[in-house]
């Protein structure tokens, strides 16, 4: 009886896979890095360390009889339970998974995904890449998906300020993409002095203008009793493998949370030719009397073929916050394997 049940289960599973597509991808990295500074404890950390990282992603897609397409992705690195024990198994919590349903130009995505601002506004890490993301964690870069307490990266966005589950609706039409998103602050509850939902709006356009490949994005996010954030950015790809971009952000923050409004601007450049890719970016944050930060990042990679890359990264940060005026740098060097 057990053998018959097992065989029947295998046949059902095989039939399900035949009508959809399941893919497995991953990346592994090995090398050395220097974190430079411990922001949480405000002390230098100049010890060179080994760097090893592994990320595995399952992607599942399918198509219904009426033309609807659907799918889901789970990132095993993001699904680790150390942050929210049991989060992956609990439908009220985000555990590294996202899923979508799409028809024509309309798509609804829920779970571990970007808010409308982050989805529509291009970032300025334009070429290359590093093991430790040195080019995006320096204190002058705005990565638009919120503050990262693990790496110290800075981002003027409200993504992740709530429970981490985001619902975003996108509609694409003739080069334009429009987005609307919502993220609950505390699983639907109304939090005093904050509100209950982070709302986001965004629009982007991508196309060719003469010989230039241009992308322009505008995004807005608000949490009714806390902050309003507006970001605009543009990136352009030129002939000869060169690219460049500009970005500007204004955050209006309620005084009970932060004394001053915050402004950010940044510029980025990229170059890609054959196996070589190099990116450079610079940015500044200005929070009035509360302080300011700035920094630049460099990333370079060389494609060795077959999914293997050599990577180098460097980041420099300068800050004057709360009476502390200091600077530090980070770097990393090693190999990335793409599977």
Image (cartoon, grey):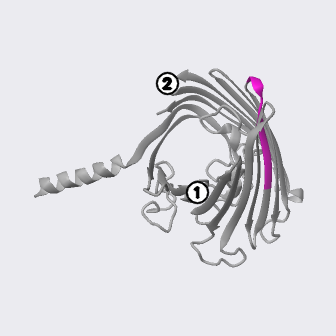
Q: Please tell me in which quadrant of the rendered image residue 192 appears.
A: bottom right
Which of 283/256 is in front?
A: 283
Does 167 appear above or below 232? below
Query: In the image, 47: left or right of 100?
Result: right
Q: Is residue 239 magenta?
A: yes
Q: Is residue 224 left or right of residue 92?
A: right
Q: Residue 230, located in which quarter of the rendered image?
A: bottom right
Q: Residue at x 79, y 43 (%)?
A: 234
Q: Which residue, given by chain and number where applicable, does mark 1 sit on?
A: 107
Specify the quadrant that holds the N terminus.
bottom left
Q: Give the percent coordinates (x, y) of residue 131.
A: 59, 35
Residue 70 pos. (x, y %): 48, 55
Specify start and end residues of the magenta stretch as a single range: 231-240
Q: Which residue is mark 2?
A: 306
Q: Main secondary structure of the magenta part?
A: strand
Q: Residue at x 71, y 74 (%)?
A: 194
């Amino acid at each position: 009886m057990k053998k018959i049940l097992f065989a029947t289960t295998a046949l059902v599973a095989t039939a399900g896979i035949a009508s959809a597509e399941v893919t497995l991808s991953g990346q592994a990295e090995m090398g050395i890095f220097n974190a430079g500074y411990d922001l949480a404890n405000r002390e230098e950390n100049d010890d060179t360390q080994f760097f090893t990282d592994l990320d595995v992603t399952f992607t599942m897609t399918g198509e219904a009889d009426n033309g609807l397409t659907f799918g889901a992705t789970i990132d095993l690195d993001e699904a680790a339970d150390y942050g929210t024990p049991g989060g992956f198994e609990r439908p009220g919590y985000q555990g590294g998974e996202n899923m979508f349903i799409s028809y024509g130009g309309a798509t609804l995505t829920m779970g571990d995904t970007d808010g409308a601002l982050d989805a529509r506004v291009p970032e300025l890490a334009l070429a290359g890449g590093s093991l430790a993301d040195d080019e995006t964690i320096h204190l002058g870069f705005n990565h638009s998906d919120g503050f990262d307490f693990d790496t110290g990266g800075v981002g003027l966005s409200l993504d992740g300020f709530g429970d981490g589950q985001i619902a975003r609706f996108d509609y694409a039409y003739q080069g334009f993409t429009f987005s609307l998103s919502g993220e609950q602050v505390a699983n639907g509850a109304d939090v005093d002095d904050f509100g209950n939902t982070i709302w986001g709006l965004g629009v982007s356009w991508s196309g060719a203008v003469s010989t230039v490949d241009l992308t322009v994005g505008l995004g807005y996010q608000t949490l009714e009793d806390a902050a309003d954030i507006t970001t605009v950015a543009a990136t352009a790809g030129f002939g000869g493998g060169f690219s460049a971009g500009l970005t500007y952000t204004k955050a209006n923050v309620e005084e009970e949370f932060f004394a001053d409004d915050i402004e950010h601007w940044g510029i980025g450049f990229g170059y890609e030719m054959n196996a070589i890719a190099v990116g450079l970016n610079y940015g500044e944050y200005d929070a009035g009397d509360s302080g300011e930060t700035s920094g630049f990042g460099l990333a370079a990679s060389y494609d060795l073929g077959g999914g293997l890359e050599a990577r180098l990264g460097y980041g420099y940060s300068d800050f004057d916050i709360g009476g502390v005026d200091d600077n530090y740098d980070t770097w990393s060097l090693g190999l990335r394997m793409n599977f």
